[in-house]
Image: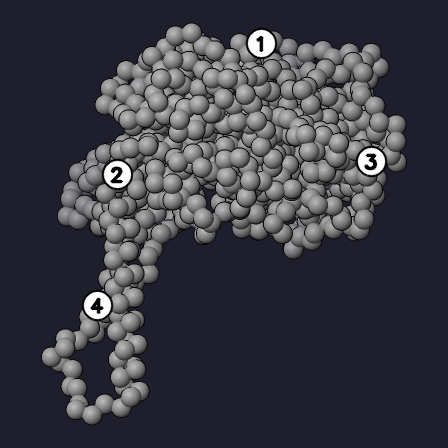
Amino acid sequence: MAERKHAPVSVRFGAFDVSLDTQELRKHGIRLKLSGQAIQVLLILLEIPGQLVTREELQQQLWPGASFGDFEHGLNAAVNRLREVLGDSATDPKFIETIPRRGYRFIGQIEKELLLKESVITVLPTRDSLEIRPRLGRHWILLLSAGGVLLTLCSLVYVLVHQRRKSLDEMKVIPFTTYPGFEAAPSFSPDGNEIAFSWFRPEQDAPLIKADLYVKQIGNESPVRLTNHEAKFLVPAWSPDGRNIAFGMVGKDGDGIYLIPALGGRERLLAKISDANWQWLLLSWSPDSKWLAFASASRTQQTVETDPTERYRIHLLNVETAEERVLPDPAPDCTMTIEPAISPDGKFLASVCVLTFGVNKLFVQQIDGKLPRQIAQVSTSFVPAGLAWSADGHSIIYSTYGTTSRLWRVPAEGGRPEQLPFPRETQNPAIARVGNRLAYAQSHYNFDVWSLPLGARGNDIKPERFISSTWDQGFPQISRDGKLIAFNSNRSGNDEIWICDRDGSKPVQLTSFDGPQTGQPHWSADGKQIIFNSNLSGKVDLHLVSVDGGRSRQVPTGTPNAVSPFWSADSRWIYFATQQPNGIWKITPEGGVAIRLAKDGAYPQESADGKRVFYVVRGERSELWSVSVNGGDERHESGMPPLPYDVLWTPVQDGIYFIDGVPSHFFVNYFDFASRRAKRIQDIRNMSFICCGITVSRDNNTLLFSGIDKLESDIVLVENFR
């Protein structure tokens, strides 16, 4: 006979997770204090999200027989408490909306409902209950033997599943840091009792800009500050012998890999590196604390003639002798190799092979770079957000990136990745060598599209939130007639292409790829179609979609990949870039064989007069170049300052708008074609980060950009992690 048991249901929205079985509310995996009628109100609203629950229904279920006054007081107190815990507002609700004089409804976006199917536990009959006849045919013997094998296998599976579930149940998730600002990049001491981390401490009118290195002991709330750099990014790695902490840093005091005693003291520069995002700063030690692995732009001796451009590759640096080795890419299609992680026994190196941003492969190879093998392919909005070996060396933990980031485990020999039971927006996994401990950064931030008036006078001009949700939206593009705006957003749970009215209202989802990284939309001249890139096929290609909806179609280019599309003003051509090989290309909207315009470059955009194509040439400094729309006459745009951000510029009729500055201190600049000079025209105040394309209205009065005004991150500790 079979006994049916229902597994509990978990409903997630935003950073919150509600167990309908235990009636517990958690935020980032941490249990919140919410009980009684307040949690009951939430559970009732979650039963029918988006629909009205009347006050009468709430009274019947939670306050039956109560007087009207007691019911009103109890309901108001419960809803107020619920909003307080959720950080919600009655005037500007994100989760609980009040319908005046009628009731409430849940308006938040439910990420997923986790309902485990009914599990069937079979109760087998006992030996005594079997009627075994003296004479059994041979086929009955074989059948019983097969049944015995099946029973053994089922028992083994049950034991393994039970052990796995037991290990998950034994895990204890606790906050390690709860400071204001942004704490990230944890690294355990050798004994697993301390964690080194970076902390961006907020200041007035500067939400996040200054990071430094701190060390904190588990169970002790007071951290110890080791550096005073106020860096843009800082990522530490504690040496296995416990004596030193290496850290990668970019900032005003120098971009490089440094070494500092674990107790504090004088720092030593080990290697210079280029300015980059924090994932490019991830470090890993060999078990004997002699070698340090990091990523840096370089050329190998074998490829210097065939590939003259510098690419990020993994370097091994001997911290005692300064000997430096450059490892070959694990695969020929890697545009860069980053995020090294040396195995606990020191024999293997794991790394991220970036095909294009959004399409990545995880490789494991011998420590000398030989015998690479792919163990997983990772699709994420950028590049993975860190990886770490398990303490036993049997698996690798990695994180995807952004608001949809998760922690995953994959066997070191390769296999199917397993999602770990932690909330989204987790990154920077670190695993202690002893003590069964895991640490990660639990971040909370999202990119919104902001509007900034150009040419406005005064210091009080601030950007206004224009297109927003609790998820990301980026790469805004105003249609040529100014009536619509295209952008990409993961508000549906996956990156998709969206459009909205000129005022940011009435958003409409155009694509439904349900997983592949999709973005960088651009309008056709007539405003009827949008070109964009997506890795729907496993590599990044160009796709077209009508603004009226319907299925998109791929635009074949004949190139290994295709990114950053830009439609010409006459709609005859689509310009795009490739990575590995680098180049600027054009192709007709129907597709076919692309025409190469420039041998190197990224992020192409046509000039307003339709005569040239601007693009970015990356190097020690990113420079703006241009080429004729028909090819030839490649030249550097003289007078144009270097671009600190490859995607934060756009050409207009008489010049180019671009954004420079540092986090929390950004500026809008204008490069004038006639004078060949650039001037600063507008401050962008109170923005922690700006990313993902800019667009300017045809009257040059409004600039749209994607940015973050507030970032929060804490380090979370997991005990009994196996």
Label 3, on which residue? 597
Label 1, on which residue? 459
Does residue 154 appear anywhere in the picture?
Answer: yes
Label 2, on which residue? 720
Residue type for callout 3 = Leu
Q: CA distance from mark 3 to mark 4?
A: 68 Å
- Whichever of callouts 3 and 4 sits on the residue coming sooner in the sequence is 4
Colour setup of the view: one colour
Q: Are circles 3 and 4 on residues that touch, CB within 8 Å? A: no
Question: Where in the figure is residue 144, as x and y percent of width and height?
Answer: 26, 80
Label 4, on which residue? 3
Residue type for callout 4 = Glu
- Whichever of callouts 1 and 2 sits on the residue coming sooner in the sequence is 1
- Whichever of callouts 4 and 1 sits on the residue coming sooner in the sequence is 4
Q: Please tell me whether mark 1 sits on a helix, a strand or a loop.
A: loop
Would you say 502 lies left or right of 670 here? left
At x 78%, y 47%, the residue is: 589
Q: Please tell me whether mark 4 sits on a helix, a strand or a loop.
A: strand
Q: CA distance from mark 1 to mark 2?
A: 52 Å
Q: CA distance from mark 2 to mark 3?
A: 56 Å
